[in-house]
Image: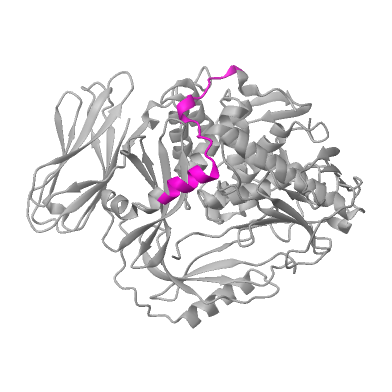
């Protein structure tokens, strides 16, 4: 069945831009809090993962009913993660009347006993469109997509037959066409896979994004290394999903020729020997596989034990590298003058991580989600490089420092202060989603560095860093090992395809709560580190000693759906709050209810001591649909700690509704 999955092909660089040094230190996380063992990922074998996927696929109808999805909505299982304590996180795509719903992905979090704890949704709106009959022809949608591709500077363009979809990534679902344009991009070499989404009723362009995200061997960047090869001396790693490395011999299509050798000694460390780039690519793939398996319990990019493959010597003087989901492969150019292949450890890890992102959160490669996609690849590129502990290429917080794209020895990107490259952004601002994803990624890269090492001047592996914060207040960091675990858990269990920076903050806080507990110093440091890159506000512990924090930033949510019976008994939804002191006089109560006649509804907030605060009365004259509102309550006489409830009652007959979720902001 076709689903809303957005296929990823991701380049290391912004196409057409040639942009612009380190040694490995002890992990700084050693002195920090240890994550809760039960919240760490279970090391599932491919067969165990397949069994979980099979179980989930066999119960999609029951799950949809449990989530109170509409009768025309169906779930399609996409991925599954399991924690050591048995908590299972199942990722689904949605369809509506058989059409893929783009931006409708969700994650269901269940306890060991099968109880749904919460649901993470890319879009909380009810999926429905007035009609699935398009007013615009597919040919019109295709013409608009080709025009958009030419406007992007594509050298050659050809469009596949548009497919009809429901576009939900912007909020309100609409019937649309998705057209994929092929050919090559403006440099004439990088593959073009521009996705254009067109309104099927008006013909207006709604969205577009570029899918191309951008034995013993002697490597060019990592010295003498051991790589996995098959007994017949082909560059096939039989211990890592049969990963293969091919020589494209400066071609730009097909698989190329599998590297073979007579004595199982590969390359000579120079770019003139065609095997050398193959050694680096194979070694990078090997290190990345080992990192994800040993640190995060993930067997291969998709978690299914299947190895991708690598292609080296792509094109001529091609200064780029890219991951392509359609071939499940990494591709590397040879750089300027075909003398500096883009096959260093961090580049290999960067490209393979695009595959991991595609198989999990599937962050759309445009806007803020595109910046998060790129940053995720940079984050785990650094993590793999540190984990490799290779003396010739020590771990650092720079990207591409070995491949010398700028020609002056400077790296491609910096994580401690991204703006040092002249284009990347250090901090979030309202227009950051409008810049190239390779530069908007700077916000998350900076967050990860600060979360790992803390702010201010320090030396790691012989490299000097001096990382600032947007508010001038320091953050201490939680250690790189902890930061990696927080980001991986957030990516694989809490982010969705259209996650932006604000939602990434929520996702990492959810991950930190699972791993370290809510309102702990480590949890608060995660919140304060986001504030240090201008996403959200500071909270109490874990920030600058002189910073009292902003207690009003604490948000508690319950997103489990509850059916509201027609003219029936009141229903309640609970939120447990763990914090000291009194509730504020401006307690915010956010409510999300789907109901065709909201005048039927009476809403009350019930404090832990049973006191009821009326939020909304019924009104026969209020005929509008749904309740999506934030109410302010003077709850200053109440203790904050305890179980708060939202009580909802439908007092008139005629229709039913659903409480989608609610939250308290202290």
In reply to whether residue 541 is colored magenta, the answer given is no
Q: Taking 377 as reference, is 519 above or below it?
A: above
Q: Residue 255 at x, y = what percent?
A: 73, 64
Q: Residue 313 at x, y = what percent?
A: 81, 59
Stretch of the chain drawn in magenta: 31-54
- Left or right relative to 406: residue 55: left
- Left or right relative to 77: residue 65: left
User: Does the rendering let one see residue 656?
Assistant: yes
Q: Residue 344 at x, y = what percent?
A: 78, 45
Q: Which residue shows up at 7% across the image and 49% down it? A: 651
Q: Quadrant of residue 642?
A: top left
In reply to whether residue 41 is colored magenta, the answer given is yes
Q: Which residue shows up at 50% across the image and 31% down it? A: 40
Q: Quadrant of the C terminus?
A: top left
The outermost residue toward the front is 231
Q: Taking 647 as reference, is 181 above or below it?
A: below
Q: Residue 20 at x, y = what percent?
A: 76, 47
Q: Quadrant of residue 377?
A: top right
Q: Which residue shows up at 42% across the image and 70% down it? A: 176
User: Does the rendering let one see residue 415?
Assistant: no
């Amino acid at each position: 069945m076709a689903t809303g999955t957005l296929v990823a092909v991701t380049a290391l660089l912004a196409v057409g831009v040639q942009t612009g040094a380190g040694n490995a230190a002890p992990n700084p996380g050693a002195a920090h809090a240890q994550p809760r063992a039960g919240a760490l990922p279970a090391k599932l074998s491919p067969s165990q993962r397949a069994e979980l996927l099979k179980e989930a696929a066999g119960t999609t109808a029951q799950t949809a009913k449990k989530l109170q999805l509409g009768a025309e909505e169906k779930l399609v299982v996409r991925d599954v993660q399991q924690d050591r304590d048995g908590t299972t996180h199942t990722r689904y795509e949605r369809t509506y009347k058989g059409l893929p719903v783009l931006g409708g992905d969700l994650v269901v979090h269940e306890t060991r006993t099968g109880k749904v704890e919460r649901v993470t949704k890319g879009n909380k709106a009810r999926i429905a469109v007035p009609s699935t009959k398009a007013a615009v022809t597919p040919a019109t949608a295709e013409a608009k997509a080709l025009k958009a591709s030419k406007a992007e500077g594509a050298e050659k363009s050809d469009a596949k037959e548009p497919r009809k979809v429901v576009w939900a990534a912007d909020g309100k679902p609409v019937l649309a066409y998705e057209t994929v344009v092929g050919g090559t991009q403006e440099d004439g070499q990088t593959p073009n896979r521009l996705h254009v989404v067109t309104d099927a009723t008006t013909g207006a362009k709604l969205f577009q994004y570029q899918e191309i995200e951008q034995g013993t061997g002697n490597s060019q960047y990592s010295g003498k290394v051991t790589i996995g090869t098959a007994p017949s001396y082909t560059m096939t790693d039989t211990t890592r999903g049969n990963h293969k490395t091919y020589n494209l011999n400066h071609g730009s299509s097909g698989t190329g020729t599998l590297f073979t050798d007579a004595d199982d000694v590969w390359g000579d460390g120079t770019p003139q020997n065609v095997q050398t780039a193959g050694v680096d690519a194979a070694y990078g793939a090997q290190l990345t596989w080992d990192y994800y398996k040993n640190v995060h319990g993930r067997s291969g990019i998709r978690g299914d034990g299947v190895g991708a493959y690598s292609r080296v010597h792509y094109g001529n003087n091609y200064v780029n590298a890219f991951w392509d989901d359609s071939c499940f492969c990494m591709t590397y150019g040879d750089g300027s003058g075909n003398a500096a292949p883009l096959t260093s450890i961090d580049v290999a890890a960067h490209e393979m991580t695009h595959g991991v992102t595609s198989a999990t959160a599937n962050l759309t490669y445009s806007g803020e989600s595109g910046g998060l996609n790129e940053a995720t690849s940079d984050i785990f590129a650094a993590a793999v490089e540190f984990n490799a502990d290779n003396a010739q290429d020590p771990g650092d917080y720079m990207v591409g420092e070995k491949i010398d794209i700028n020609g002056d020895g400077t790296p491609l990107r910096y994580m401690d202060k991204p703006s040092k490259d002249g284009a990347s952004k250090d901090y979030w601002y309202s227009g950051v989603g409008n810049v190239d994803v390779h530069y908007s990624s700077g916000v998350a890269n900076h967050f990860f560095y600060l979360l790992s090492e803390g702010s201010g001047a320090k030396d790691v592996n012989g490299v000097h860093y001096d990382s600032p914060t947007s508010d001038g207040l320091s953050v201490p960091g939680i250690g790189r090992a902890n930061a990696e675990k927080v980001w991986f858990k957030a990516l694989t269990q809490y982010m969705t395809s259209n996650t932006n920076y604000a939602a990434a903050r929520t996702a990492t806080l959810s991950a930190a709560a699972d791993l370290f507990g809510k309102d702990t110093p480590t949890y608060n440091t995660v919140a304060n580190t986001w504030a240090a890159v201008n996403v959200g506000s500071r909270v109490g512990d874990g920030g600058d000693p002189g910073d009292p924090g902003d207690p009003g930033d604490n948000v508690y949510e319950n997103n489990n759906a509850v059916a509201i019976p027609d003219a029936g008994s009141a229903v309640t939804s609970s939120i447990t709050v763990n914090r000291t002191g009194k509730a504020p006089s401006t307690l915010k109560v956010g409510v999300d209810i789907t109901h065709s006649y909201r005048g039927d509804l009476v809403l009350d907030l019930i404090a832990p001591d049973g006191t009821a605060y009326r939020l909304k009365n019924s009104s026969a004259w209020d005929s509008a649909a749904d309740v999506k509102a934030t109410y302010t309550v003077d709850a200053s006489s109440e203790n904050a700690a305890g179980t708060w409830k939202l009580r909802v009652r439908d007092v008139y007959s005629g229709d039913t509704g659903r409480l989608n979720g609610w939250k308290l902001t202290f």
